[in-house]
Image (cartoon, rainbow, N blue to C red):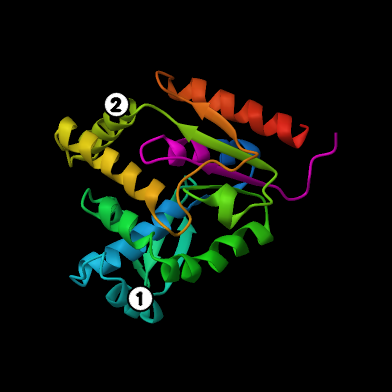
């Protein structure tokens, strides 16, 4: 079957499911643009943190939005870089304390509306593999491929623990486990675009998988759905 000129792949799932790493890899394989929407929300969360604003203070967070300019770029390795008002904050938004800020600000409807056009515009311009919490349900409901990626809480905490250790910002495993459980609760129970699989999403549990096993499964799903 002839390949579609443009296609959109939506990969949703809870924190620590491996969405970003896997989506980046399959996007490169498919020649599509990778969009990490979690990094976009982290950038807003980082802005609130830097300004000393409580992420639960909706009015204060919303007051920041007219003064925020978010841009995305890609380095020579195809890795997504985030810019806040012209400053590269790619490293800063991955600080452990920003995770909860991102979760809180992403529950604010005005923040989601502020970022929605940015995300949809990327899909209009070309083929994308976009990951997040509500890509298949809200951002790109017409995506040709929708995957809901998950893994056990313990598996996700272990992956996060290894990631932070490699970055030189280690945290205790039990602390990470509790943070992920809390974030799961926040993401699933929020009023604005709660975390849930799209009705037509394919669910993929990667518990116990190696990276390559999960990558191969996702590519098979995508290629089957696109008729490649």
What range is drawn magenta here? 1-24
Seen from the viewer's position, the closer of residues 82 and 206 is 206
**Residue 61 highlighted magenta (yes or no):** no
Furthest-left residue in this view = 172
Residue 163, how many percent across, how many down? 28, 35
Q: Is residue 34 visible?
A: no
- 187 displayed left or right of 200: left
Q: Which label was assigned to residue 62?
A: 1
Furthest-right residue in this view = 1
Q: Residue at x 21, y 34 (%)?
A: 165
Q: Residue at x 48, y 25 (%)?
A: 205
Total numbered circles: 2
Seen from the viewer's position, the closer of residues 166 and 8 is 8
**Dot 1: within a 10 Å radius of its alpha carbon, few (fewer than 14), some, or many (20 or more) residues?**
some
Among the 4 quarters of the image, the one containing residue 226? top right
Q: Residue at x 27, y 28 (%)?
A: 158
Rendered-image quadrant of the C terminus: top right
Residue 207, how many percent across, how many down? 41, 22
**Residue 22 highlighted magenta (yes or no):** yes
Among the 4 quarters of the image, the one containing residue 171? top left
- 148 displayed left or right of 21: right
Residue 141, how many percent across, how many down? 64, 52
Please give the residue where the numbered disc 2 appears in the rendered image. 154
Residue 21, how many percent across, how many down? 44, 37
Among the 4 quarters of the image, the one containing residue 121? bottom right
Rendered-image quadrant of the N terminus: top right
Seen from the viewer's position, the closer of residues 104 and 51 is 104
In the displayed structure, 90 sits above or below 221; it is below
């Amino acid at each position: 079957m002839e390949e579609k000129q443009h296609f959109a792949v939506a990969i949703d799932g809870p924190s620590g499911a491996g969405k970003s790493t896997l989506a980046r890899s399959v996007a490169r394989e498919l020649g599509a643009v990778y969009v990490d929407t979690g990094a976009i929300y982290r950038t807003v969360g980082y802005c609130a943190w830097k300004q000393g604003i409580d992420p639960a203070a909706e009015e204060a967070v919303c007051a920041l939005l007219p003064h925020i300019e978010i841009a995305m770029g890609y380095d020579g390795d195809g890795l997504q870089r985030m810019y806040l008002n012209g400053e590269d904050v790619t490293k800063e938004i991955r600080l452990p304390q920003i995770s909860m800020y991102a979760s809180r600000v992403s529950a604010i409807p005005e923040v989601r509306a502020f970022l929605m056009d940015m995300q949809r515009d990327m899909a209009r311009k070309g083929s994308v593999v976009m990951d997040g919490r509500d890509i298949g349900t809200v951002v790109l409901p017409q995506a040709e491929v929708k995957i809901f990626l998950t893994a056990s809480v313990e598996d996700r905490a272990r992956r996060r623990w290894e990631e932070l250790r490699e970055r030189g910002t280690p945290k205790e495993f039990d602390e990470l486990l509790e943070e992920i459980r809390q974030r799961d609760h926040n993401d699933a129970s929020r009023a604005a675009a709660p975390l849930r699989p799209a009705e037509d999403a394919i669910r993929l549990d990667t518990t116990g998988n190696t990276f390559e096993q999960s990558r191969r499964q996702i590519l098979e799903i995508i290629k089957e759905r696109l008729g490649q």
